[in-house]
Amino acid sequence: MKKYLLVSILTVGMLLMSLASVQAADKNSKFGFIDLQKVMALSAQGQIAKGKIKARQDELRGILQKKQTDISAMKEELERQGMMLSPEKRQEKESTYQKKVRDFKIFVSDSEKDMKSLEGEFLKKMLKDLEIVTSEFGKSGKYQLILEKRSGIIYADDNNDVTDELIKAYDKWAANNQKK
């Protein structure tokens, strides 16, 4: 683990030193970095994805609350009537209750998987789109390199942060491509 960390740090260090030497050699070179999380959170597509995810979460939360209420009511009924029921009837109700509890746990698990899958789909699509947009943005802005802030940059001058410009470019690109 320590070897990988050391190798990663050395690699990033060498990359930054080579970038510094290239930039020193060519004053016209442009380098930038973006904050991908900020792009995901503030872009129009990110807001749309967040809204759809929240809507699905709210829908699932409503279903879960209803199921939980039903299970609680069934448990209370079983506790109230437990002594008055015949052993066979009590066993039948307990079995039904246990089945509902198992179904509830399965539904919770499936809901969590569903949400992770939905988030993954949005993330995958946004990253694919952002790759195109960043490439176009970099070419049009004559950037030699655009890095992601959290992928190894230890320090970068905020003047090289192109996140806000990229968000605008992404929003414009997404609006144009949705019309098609």
Image (cartoon, helix red, strand yellow):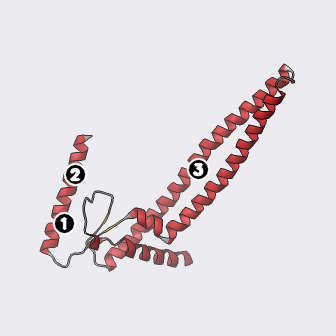
Return the residue at label 3.
114
Q: Quadrant of the C terminus?
A: bottom right
> x, y percentage for residue 137?
36, 75
Label 1, on which residue? 19
**Residue at horizontal 50 percent and vertical 79 percent from the top:** 176
Q: Kindly give the residue lying farthest to the top in the view shown.
A: 87
- Select label 2 or label 1 by which is in front: 2
Q: Is residue 8 left or right of residue 67?
A: left
Q: Amino acid at mark 2?
A: Ile
Q: Earlier in the sequence, mark 3 or mark 1?
A: 1
Q: Where does the image place residue 167, in percent across and percent down from the top left?
A: 42, 73
Residue extending furthest toward the front: 80
Neighbor class of circle 3 (other Cα within 10 Å; few <14, some 14-19, many 20+) is: some
Tell me the distance, in whole angstroms, between the alpha carbons under discs 3 and 1. Answer: 43 Å
Q: Regarding mark 2 in the picture, which secondary structure is present there?
A: helix
* Front one among 176 and 14: 14
Q: State the SS at label 1.
A: helix
Residue beneath the point at 44% across and 73% down = 170
Please name the amino acid that badge 3 sits on: Asp
Q: Amino acid at mark 1?
A: Leu
